[in-house]
Image (spheres, coloured by chain):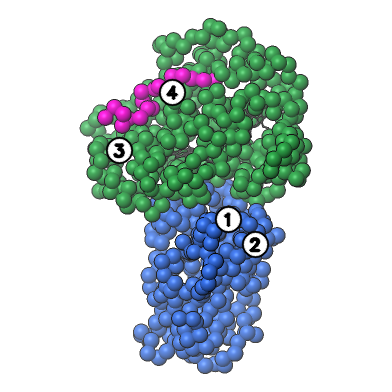
């Protein structure tokens, strides 16, 4: 069981975390949640310049130590799947207005979970007639007939472009004239679960630098496929918790190293 | 050589028939094909209409349809070269090199699947998104310029009338879904069945092919050479389908062009079907391209790495390509993923000459200057 696995991690005992405060209660049922995505800061000479960093998230949840799961409702996400496109190309910090059940106030929340990517059911439809945020053409992964789940484009210190694009690969359609109806061989939809501690506001930090470093270590400037396709892809995807051999998440992707959860006071401002 | 290019009565191609009068809504169009050839399969959600074909032709030749205004479909798919570009690999609007050679669009309405190696891309409506929106590499670079491009088209004559005619009464027909449907419709009208081979095979004109071309045809179809095994059907490609048949399941083959490190690998920039499926057995597998107008579409192969038809035939005769030097050195003849149909052939010099003559008989000169297919902006 996915949820039970976390009870071991927790520290704060039956005390509500303070990113949910009494002041943020919107109604008896819902509570505003202060949530934002940050890019890990990196300074110094020789650092690559990030030109584009965008990714889709959906199915966000707060997890409590007793196994309760509280869905996070994003205010600006569209559709039943609650998909949001987090665009960190122009800003280092992206607030994501959201609300959760007020029951979280009395729960011992010890983790935040979300899925990186676009749900299978929506991934292979005609993107030209899709609604926000699935109508973002930079995220079309047209040669694979789906979306890029995570798009990272950078320029290295030597001026070379380095790109890492993650999405579902190895898809096959049942009939020649239909989109795939069975899951792709390499879904590459990553389930992220991040342990929490501390106080004041929830920040999910994304670290593109480790991905770029992995690509650089393998001397590759493009990974736009699945994990077992090239050594550079294997190294980059393993940072998302995806095993290059099985092309599946190891331990529910918990070994991933790209995302961490912080509480605002702890996050570097 | 007795060449007969006269174009009379039944052999004079493709009439675009439309039952609609100009004040009626667009109606499904059928294309009258010569020699009772079967129709291409047209997707139900984008019925062919004369109005869409006409609009699509303007769009196909319009550089406004690129992020920096420098490139149209026709920049890479030039009618004079049977809708190819004569380059080894295509060059995108921002100067980035594609990993692939530009294929012909002639009779592409009959090709399923599309591109050199994707089993997923079955319809033109899907394929056209790639040159428009892809960023690996950037081709037309439309991504994130959609708004500017649509605004430019909106005020450009004769688009307002053409969009209105194609989608009468639609509140705002200027969107990329319609643009793609119109371009796909035009591309489906790029049809050619007027080569000497067609006159001989479908038109039953015994004198259309020379003796050498006939010998070449017979070699091509023979069990010894097996060319037709992969290059069969209307377009001399196993991937050609029409209303009366279905394409084979996996029409992709490794023809032994590379064998890096003697492990069967193809260069990492393009490993064909493997890059889509991730299965080792799919290494180096590509679609057998159409051979229509092949004499005009040099250089050859998915990466344009073979300069002439003569060299292509030499490679087939050897049962693959032995690259002695360079970064891609390796004996492709020994590639473990190579198709069993590509194996050393005993071909005499006359055989090779006959095959070359036959391949030249697949050229349809009428397509190159067809007044329904050329650049409409030139006449404006």
Q: Position of residue B290 (x, y in %)?
A: 56, 29
The disc numbered 3 marks a residue on which chain? Answer: B
Whether labels 3 and 4 share one chain: yes
The disc numbered 2 marks a residue on which chain? Answer: A
The disc numbered 4 marks a residue on which chain? Answer: B
Q: Which residue is mark 4?
A: B368
Of mark 3 and mark 4, the one earlier in the sequence is 3
Circle 3 or circle 4, nearest the eye: 4
SS category of the residue bearing label 4:
helix
Q: Which residue is mark 1?
A: A221
Vertical position of residue B308 compared to residue A183: above or below? above
Q: Which residue is mark 2?
A: A217
**Count of numbered marks:** 4
Looking at this view, is B84 or B96 the one in front? B96
Q: Are marks 2 and 1 in contact (CB under 8 Å)?
A: no
Q: Residue at 40%, 22% (x, y): give it.
A: B369
Q: Position of residue B342 (x, y in %)?
A: 72, 30
* Colour displayed for chain B in the image of the structure: green
Q: Which residues are magenta?
A: B362-380
Q: For mark 2, does the 10 Å Cα neighbourhood hold few (<14), some (14 to 19), or many (20 or more) residues?
A: few
Looking at this view, is B95 or B71 the one in front? B95
SS category of the residue bearing label 2:
helix
Q: Residue at 65%, 26% (x, y): give it.
A: B311
Vertical position of residue B243 compared to residue A22: above or below? above
Q: Residue at 42%, 12% (x, y): give it.
A: B7
Q: Are marks 1 and 3 in contact (CB under 8 Å)?
A: no
Q: Residue at 46%, 74% (x, y): give it.
A: A37
Q: From mark 3 to mark 4, how far is it between C-alphas?
A: 26 Å
């Amino acid at each position: 069981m996915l949820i039970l696995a976390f009870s071991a991690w927790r520290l704060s005992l039956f005390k509500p975390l303070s990113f949910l405060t009494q002041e943020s209660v919107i109604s008896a049922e819902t509570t505003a949640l202060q949530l934002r995505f940050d890019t890990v800061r990196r300074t110094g000479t020789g650092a690559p310049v990030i030109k584009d960093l965008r990714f889709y998230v959906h199915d966000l949840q707060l997890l409590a130590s007793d196994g309760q799961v509280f869905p996070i409702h994003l205010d600006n996400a569209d559709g039943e799947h609650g998909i949001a496109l987090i665009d960190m190309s122009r800003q280092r910090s992206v607030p994501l207005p959201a609300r959760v059940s007020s029951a979280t106030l009395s729960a011992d929340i010890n983790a935040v979970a979300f899925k990186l990517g676009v749900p299978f059911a929506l991934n292979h439809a005609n993107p030209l007639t899709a609604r926000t945020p699935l109508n973002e053409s930079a995220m079309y992964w047209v040669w694979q007939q789906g979306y890029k789940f995570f798009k990272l484009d950078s320029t290295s210190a030597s001026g070379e472009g380095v790109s890492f694009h993650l999405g579902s690969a190895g898809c096959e359609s049942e009939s020649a004239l239909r989109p795939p109806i069975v899951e792709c061989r390499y879904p590459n939809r990553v389930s992220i679960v991040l342990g929490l501690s501390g106080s004041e506001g929830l920040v999910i930090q994304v670290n593109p630098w480790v991905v770029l470093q992995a690509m650089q270590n393998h001397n590759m400037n493009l990974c736009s496929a699945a994990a077992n396709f090239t050594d550079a892809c294997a190294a980059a995807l393993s940072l998302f918790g995806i095993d290059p051999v099985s092309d599946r998440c190891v331990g529910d992707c918990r070994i991933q190293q790209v995302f961490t959860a912080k509480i605002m006071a702890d996050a570097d401002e | 050589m007795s060449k007969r290019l006269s174009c009379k009565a039944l052999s004079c191609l493709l009439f675009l028939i439309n039952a609609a009068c100009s004040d009626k809504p667009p109606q499904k169009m059928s294309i009258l094909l010569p020699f009772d050839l079967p129709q291409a399969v047209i997707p139900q959600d984008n019925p062919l209409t004369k109005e869409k074909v006409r609009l699509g032709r303007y769009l196909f030749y319009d550089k406004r349809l690129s992020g920096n205004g420098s490139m149209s479909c026709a920049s890479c798919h030039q009618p004079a070269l049977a809708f190819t570009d004569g380059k080894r690999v295509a060059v995108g609007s921002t100067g980035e090199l594609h990993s692939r050679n530009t294929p012909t669009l002639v009779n592409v309405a009959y090709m399923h699947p599309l591109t050199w190696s994707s089993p997923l891309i079955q319809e033109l409506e899907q394929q056209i998104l790639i040159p428009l929106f892809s960023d690996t590499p950037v081709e037309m670079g439309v991504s994130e310029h959609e708004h500017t491009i649509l605004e430019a088209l909106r005020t450009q004559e004769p688009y307002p009338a053409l969009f209105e005619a194609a989608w009468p009464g639609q509140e705002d027909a200027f969107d990329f879904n319609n643009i793609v449907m119109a371009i796909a419709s035009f591309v489906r009208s790029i049809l050619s069945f007027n080569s000497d081979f067609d006159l001989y095979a479908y038109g039953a004109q015994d004198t259309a092919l020379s003796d050498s071309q006939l010998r070449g045809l017979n070699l091509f179809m023979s069990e010894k050479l097996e060319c037709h095994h992969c290059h069969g059907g209307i377009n001399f490609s196993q991937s050609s389908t029409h209303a009366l048949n279905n394409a084979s399941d996996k029409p992709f083959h490794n023809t032994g062009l590379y064998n890096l490190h003697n492990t069967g690998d193809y260069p990492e920039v393009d490993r064909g079907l493997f890059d889509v499926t991730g299965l080792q057995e799919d290494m180096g597998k590509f679609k057998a391209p159409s051979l229509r107008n092949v004499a005009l579409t040099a250089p050859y192969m998915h990466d344009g790495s073979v300069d002439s038809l003569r060299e292509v035939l030499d490679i087939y005769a050897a049962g693959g390509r032995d690259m002695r030097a360079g970064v891609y050195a390796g004996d492709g003849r020994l590639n473990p993923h190579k198709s069993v149909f590509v194996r050393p052939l005993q071909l005499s010099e006359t055989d090779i000459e006959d095959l070359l003559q036959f391949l030249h008989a697949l050229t349809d000169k009428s397509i190159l200057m067809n007044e329904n297919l050329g650049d409409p902006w030139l006449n404006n």
